[in-house]
Amino acid sequence: MTPLAFLFLSVATVAIWALPRRLAAVPLLAGACYMTLGQGVEVAGLNFPIIRLLLLAGVIRVLVRGERPASGLIGMDKLFLLWAAWAVVASAFHERPAATLKFHLGFVYNALCIYFLIRCFCQREEEVHGLIRITAWILVPVAAEMVYEQFTGHNLFSVFGGVDPEPAVRNGRIRSQGPFAHAILAGTVGAVCIPLMIGLWRRHSVSAKVGLGACSVMVLTSASSGPLMSVILSIFGLVLWPWRHLTRQMRIAAVIGYILLDMVMKAPAYYLIARIDLTGSSASYHRAALINAAVKHLDEWWWAGTDYTRHWLAYGVPWSPDHADITNHYIGQGVKGGLVLMGLFIALIWCGFRYAGAAMQVRRGVDTGREFFAWCIGAALFAHAASCVSVAYFDQSVLFLYLTLGVLATLRVEKMEAVADVPTQEPEFIEQQARRSVQQPPALDLQNRMSVSDSPVQS
């Protein structure tokens, strides 16, 4: 660990412990955006990059202060715990259980800590607004550095290790990556944050404009088709806002449309991915071929994953003799823990969409601003869901995925509390009032209601 990285770690750790609860997640965002995986320590064979050390500092704060998620454990919390438990159990069915367990504990640690710390630190919608506002400004230096890479061909974050000094070049275009492990991941972070910034527009227009500018720069300088496609799909989700009451019909139409495409196409419908090339240098055919290979070799990984995928495709990757390039987060879950782990991960995404819908319903027709904010976070999750088809999160960028799920859980909790605060009436009383309103003239009915409210005996 370099002295500069150690100084950053020290300041960020103190900030996590000292800041008010609503700001305690800010050092985590800074750690994800300003530090690479090249900085950290190794303890008993376990790798702790700076982001994991900051997560540990957050866990210590929560335990010492007795901070807990609002409303206790909710449905998504239990799904997360079940997903984590199966990831650990599935490691026992691999060829090298000890090594696999160590690897699985790493990504389970990241996911659980990020999600539950967000649940503990952001417990109100106002605090979610504040966190997204700060995210907008935190991304500005990252975007500026990625522009610097375009002009100089040098990555300033390489001083911390974990990223190459010279960014990759494809078809003559520099692919800026900033502190992230790959240019696609850098662009994906910008893409999935665009809907969040649009959600801020009505209340914090300056921060929203700054954030939109930074995110757009990150997407463009990454020179990758995946992030551009995620932006297009997230904007498509936002455009559907006027027809939000038809989401169920849209889901049914999407499923029917895919089935019809699969029936009329010679190749499986997912091979449409191979035709998407927004930059002229996309590996979109690889992504379609990977899905086809995963289906073809289902018998090898369906139960608890597999340790060998090199034979899935005709080409491999230089960093692993055992695996193909798994550029699909869903398939990556399957390779780690089989259909069960993949299914639980998809269930988490599905639960997030349900929470977005539930957060909107409680305000429908009452507060369209807050309703639109929930829709925008749902659009951000939609961008994540689309990105998972073209990239596997394997660095600190995963923080933005689980942060999105965490804030959706916060909105869900507020919805539950809002419903609980609405006074309820007995069905018999409601039926009696409805009958009286039909039988009596309006003036007489008003007089009766006034007499009831004035008389404690009658009430």
Image (tube, helix red, strand yellow):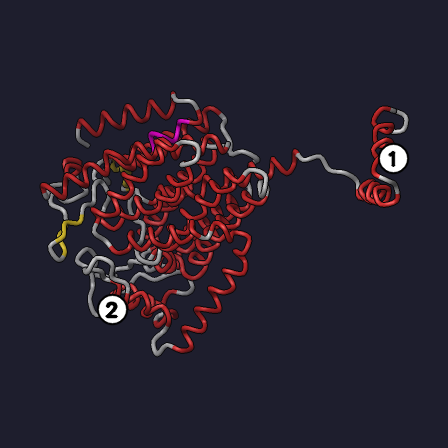
Q: Which residue is mark 1?
A: 444
Q: Quadrant of residue 303?
A: bottom left
Task: Check residue 43 for magenta coloring.
Answer: no
Task: Name the foreground residue: 5 vs 34.
Answer: 34
Residue 359 appears at what percent x and percent y? Answer: 54, 42
Question: Which of 82/407 is in front?
Answer: 407
Is residue 206 or residue 304 the one in the foreground? 206
Density class for disc 2 (Cα within 10 Å; few <14, some 14-19, many ≥20) is some
The residue type indicated by label 2 comes to Leu
- Mark 1 crowd level (few <14, some 14–19, many ≥20, 10 Å Cα): few
For the point 31% across and 65% down, which residue is it? 273
Q: Is residue 9 above or below residue 175?
A: above
The residue sitting at 54% across, 44% down in the picture is 360
Residue that protrudes farthest toward the top in the picture: 18
Specify the farthest residue to the left.
152
Q: Nearer the viewer, mark 1 or mark 2?
A: 1
x, y percent for residue 259: 45, 71
Dot 1: element: helix
Residue 23 lies in what quarter of the image? top left
Q: For residue 313, which numbered disc appears in the image?
A: 2
Image position of 419 (left or right of 379): right
Q: Which mark is residue 136?
A: none
What residue type is disc 1 on?
Answer: Leu
Q: Magenta residues? A: 23-28
* Main secondary structure of the magenta stretch: helix
